Image: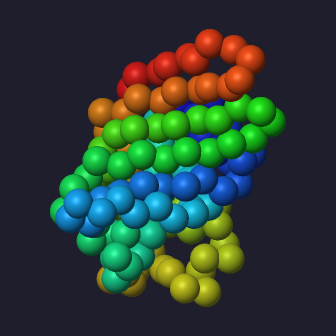
Amino acid sequence: MEELYEFLKQAQTYYLATVEGDQPRVRPFGTVDLFEGRLYIQTGKSKPVSKQIHANPKVELCAFQGGTWLRIAGELARDDRLEAKKHMLDNYPSLRAMYDEHDDNTEVLYFTHGTATFSSFTAAPRTITF
């Protein structure tokens, strides 16, 4: 999990894909956290992406850096604990202008049933299941 986290942190931006009905939706994200051995992302409950995830928790993200790309496919589960929200926001203090672990909007989600694949044009893909 540490390797996935470090790759996403170094990439800084990744693209998260969800579905809305039968329409795929992709948008850039930048928040990633490793908390209690799980890979987390953060959003606001009021955003369409949150509603899409709760309607269908299957997502995929993709990040690229240094000639390698990482795809993570899995399901996201909400963690409503203050500790998880605080950990994320402590790692992204600039988000505190919009979010707080005590508000009703901050949402952190972690990957379950995930498959991560590292790929490049010069090496065979490598897959990690978690």
What residue is drawn where x is 57% and y is 63%? 28
Based on the displayed image, in which of its 4 quarters is residue 105 positioned? bottom left
Q: Position of residue 89 (x, y in %)?
A: 56, 68
Q: Is residue 64 left or right of residue 55?
A: right
What residue is drawn where x is 38% and y is 43%? 111
Q: Is residue 46 above or below residue 123?
A: below
Q: Is residue 22 left or right of residue 46?
A: left
Q: Position of residue 63 (x, y in %)?
A: 62, 45
- Extreme residue toward the right, this view: 66
Its colouring scheme is rainbow
Query: Considering depth in this image, is 122 or 70 the residue closer to the camera?
Result: 122
Q: Position of residue 80 (x, y in %)?
A: 30, 64
What residue is drawn where x is 68% and y is 76%? 94
Q: Quadrant of the C terminus?
A: top left
- Count of residue discs: 0
Q: Is residue 30 above or below residue 71?
A: below
Query: Considering depth in this image, is 124 or 78 the residue closer to the camera?
Result: 124
Q: Is residue 19 visible to the viewer in this orientation of the structure?
A: yes
- Extreme residue toward the top, this view: 124
Q: Is residue 6 visible to the viewer in this orientation of the structure?
A: no
Q: Position of residue 37 (x, y in %)?
A: 46, 36
Q: Is residue 126 above or below residue 44?
A: above
What residue is drawn where x is 80% and y is 36%? 66
